[in-house]
Image (cartoon, rainbow, N blue to C red):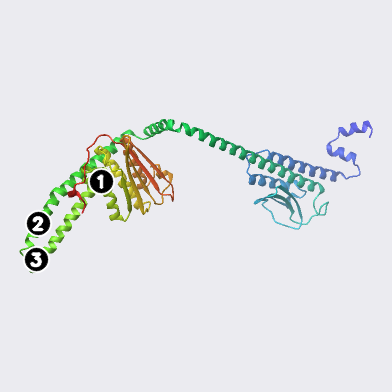
């Protein structure tokens, strides 16, 4: 080609230049070929843009690639496509299988393979590969190769990230082993910081009100129990004595009626004693917390069939009345939770005193519950009861810890300062429950 011809071709449009180089090819065929190449280049460029976005999921990538297929092929209006990678698949809305198929497979690793499929939905004139152009074969091969490289890189990046995370985990485990040497010195500081945060979270007024309410309630219950014992109990005892004396002087039907009356009075005395112990156990005030908890365990066995294994350290330590009442009510609340909510069949209650503190643990074999209720903020009655226990214990300068999860039972630990209180002696036989 002469220099003049080259200069003239530079001034022409691309289609005119190609036609000038190949004058034997009709102009409309040249234009058609150019449009097809532009479509193929557009598809490749768009694919590159999609694969540059690392935020996309595998399904998002496949869905965006499959949308690029119909516009890139010679007959977009009758073109359907599908892209598969392992179990993940994306299709064009008009997808259906036909006998006019162009496909290309690619493999990421021995366990993961992919495939690109392009279908014409009706018969079209034959080209290099059925109705498909030779350039379209190059295009589908290029798309498959780009997807292969992209997902290989993603898997390699994930493997590298997993290795990095595993290395970090190992470093943390080794670091944790070293930190255990200092854990004993730091535990007290962490405990005080946690306690301070809890104090800032809760409302101080609620604590004082809660403590005052429980003591007021307990005083009223003791007064009612005292009246039952001193007034009604004594009156029934005198009536029983009178009925017993009259039985010796009566016979026949009158004697039988007096015998029945004697039995009714005896039942009323037993019911009065039982109600007295339910309202306010004298054992708690006369004999101490351990004796009261032991009697509570016996009561739970009789009333609800709950096996309660109680063990104390035998100290029956002197405690302030407020502390004894609080712990007794808290243990009773936990035992009722074990019966009503946890559906437990056995509970272990332990009492230990050491270093100026008393610790009471209650462990059941029930079904446990979720962390929200364990934190004491559940919306049901149990959640409120746990919140109440936590507040009352905190007000006394103690702590309440709960460890539970569904299906694993519940462990509750109550600790409180011993303080100064009444020293309790041995159990009075006259206070034994009938």
Question: Which residue in the protein does label 1 denote?
Answer: 291
Question: Which residue in the protein does label 3 denote?
Answer: 255
Residue 189 in percent (x, y) is at 41, 30
Residue 396 in percent (x, y) is at 30, 35
Marks 2 and 1: CB-CB under 8 Å?
A: no
Closest to the observer, 415 or 206: 415
Within 10 angstroms of label 2, few (less than 14), some, or many (20 or more) residues? Answer: few
Image quadrant assignment for residue 419: top left
Disc with the residue nearer the chain's start (2 vs 1): 2
Disc with the residue nearer the chain's start (3 vs 1): 3
Question: Which residue in the protein does label 2 denote?
Answer: 241
At numbered mark 2, what does the secondary structure look like: helix, strand or loop? helix
Residue shown at the point (86%, 43%) measured from the top left: 27
Residue shown at the point (38%, 40%) measured from the top left: 401
Residue shown at the point (67%, 46%) measured from the top left: 62
Q: Is residue 125 left or right of residue 294?
A: right
């Amino acid at each position: 080609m002469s220099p003049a011809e080259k200069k003239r071709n530079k001034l022409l449009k691309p289609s005119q230049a190609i036609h000038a180089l190949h004058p034997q090819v009709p102009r409309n065929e040249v234009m058609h070929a150019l449009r097809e190449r532009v479509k193929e280049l557009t598809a490749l460029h768009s694919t590159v843009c999609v694969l540059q976005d690392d935020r996309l999921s595998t399904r998002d990538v496949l869905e965006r690639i499959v949308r690029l297929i119909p516009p890139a092929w010679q007959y977009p209006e009758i073109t359907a496509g599908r892209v598969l990678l392992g179990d993940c698949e994306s299709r064009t809305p008009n997808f259906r299988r036909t006998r006019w198929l162009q496909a290309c497979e690619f493999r990421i690793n021995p366990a993961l393979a992919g495939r690109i499929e392009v279908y014409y939905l009706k018969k079209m004139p034959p080209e290099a590969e059925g109705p498909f152009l030779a350039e379209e074969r190059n295009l589908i091969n290029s798309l498959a190769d780009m997807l292969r490289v992209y997902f290989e890189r993603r898997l390699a990046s994930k493997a590298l990230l997993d290795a990095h995370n595993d290395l970090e985990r190992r470093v943390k485990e080794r670091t944790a082993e070293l930190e255990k040497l200092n854990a004993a010195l730091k535990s007290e500081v962490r405990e005080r910081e946690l306690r301070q945060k809890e104090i800032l979270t809760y409302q101080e007024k609620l604590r004082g009100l809660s403590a005052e309410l429980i003591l007021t309630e307990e005083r009223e219950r003791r007064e009612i129990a005292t009246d039952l014992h001193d007034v009604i109990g004594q009156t029934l005892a005198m009536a029983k004595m009178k009925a017993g004396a009259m039985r010796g002087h009566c016979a026949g039907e009158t004697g039988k009626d007096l015998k029945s009356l004697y039995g009714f009075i005896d039942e009323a005395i037993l019911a009065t004693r039982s109600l007295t112990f339910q309202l306010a156990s004298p054992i708690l005030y006369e004999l101490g917390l351990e004796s009261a908890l032991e009697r509570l365990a016996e009561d739970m066995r009789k009333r609800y069939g709950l096996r309660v294994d109680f063990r104390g350290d035998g100290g029956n330590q002197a405690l302030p009345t407020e502390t004894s009442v609080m712990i007794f009510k808290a243990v009773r609340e936990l035992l009722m939770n074990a019966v009503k909510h946890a559906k437990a069949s056995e509970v272990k209650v332990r009492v230990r005193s050491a270093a100026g503190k008393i610790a009471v643990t209650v462990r059941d074999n029930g079904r446990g519950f979720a962390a929200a209720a364990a934190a004491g903020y559940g919306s049901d009655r149990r959640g409120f009861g746990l919140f109440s226990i936590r507040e009352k214990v905190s007000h006394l300068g103690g702590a309440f810890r709960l460890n539970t999860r569904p299906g694993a039972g519940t462990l509750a630990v109550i600790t409180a300062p011993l303080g100064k209180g009444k020293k309790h002696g041995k159990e009075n036989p006259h206070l034994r429950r009938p």
